[in-house]
Amino acid sequence: MGAVFDSDGLSGTHHCTASVVDSPGKDLIVTAAHCLGTTSDLFVPGYHDGQAPYGIWHIQRIVTDAQWNSDSDPDHDVAFAVVEPLNGRSIESVVGAYTLGVGQGTSDPVTIIGYPEVSDEAIACTDSVTAYSSTQLRIYCTGYSGGTSGSPWLVGAGSQDGSGGTVMGVIGGYEQGGDSDDVSYSVAFGSAVQSLYEQAVSDAGN
């Protein structure tokens, strides 16, 4: 899990959060579609206090749903990105990865970890999830302001940093994740997200 910066890197401002998901190529991250404008964005896993303990990683390709591309449909506010190797190693081999989970429902507590723009450290919150609609989920967690879009919603997180968790959502979707710092939303990960993941896996192999 880490922060997303623009092309200025650590000298700029982190504007979103993303996380590594397990894939055959060991090179995928997931975030909200509205977080990634171009491949000039940079991913800094484990970012804290102005430091990049695992390096600064370049994005090679962004994969978003056609319905997001055509009209920014909030029900498709999810993106996968292929991350370039760094010093001959894949991102997953360096920092590990979460498992992608689809159809998880709302029965299990969820931990959200993200980077507010006003902070150089990640924040974490665990709470129950409710269905906001048939396609969107909602959670009440305090302090998730700008910069936390794309933050992973983790089920079965083994510790506060989310190790061992399954990503079943990301902050985004309705109101691009919510217009209140204390209520966040996510697209309900289902077949469309699974198909998008499979497309990203295929693109990564090309």
Image (tube, helix red, strand yellow):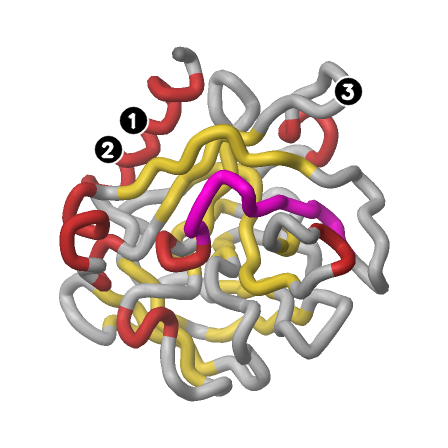
Indicate the amino acid at tag 2: Ser
Q: Can I make out residue 158 in this image?
A: no
Give the residue at x 70% y 46%.
45
The crowd level at tag 1 (other Cα within 10 Å; few <14, some 14-19, many 20+) is some
Name the residue: 56% across, 30% down.
83
Find numbered disc 3 in the image and state the secondary structure of the residue it sits on: loop
Q: Are the residues flagged by discs 2 and 1 in contact, CB closer than 8 Å?
A: yes
Task: Tell me if 199 is positioned left or right of 9 in this view.
Answer: left
Decide which of tag 1 and tag 3 comes sooner along the chain.
Answer: 3
Q: Position of residue 92 (x, y in %)?
A: 63, 29
- Cα distance, mark 1 to mark 3? 26 Å
Image quarter hosting the C terminus: top left
Magenta stretch, residue numbers? 36-47
Q: Residues within 10 Å of mark 2 (few under 14, many from 20)?
A: few
Residue labelled with disc 1: 199
Residue 115's mark? Answer: none
**Residue 35 visible in rendering:** yes
Lateral position of residue 156 relative to residue 178, left or right: right
- Most extreme residue toward the front is 8
Q: CA distance from mark 2 to mark 1?
A: 6 Å
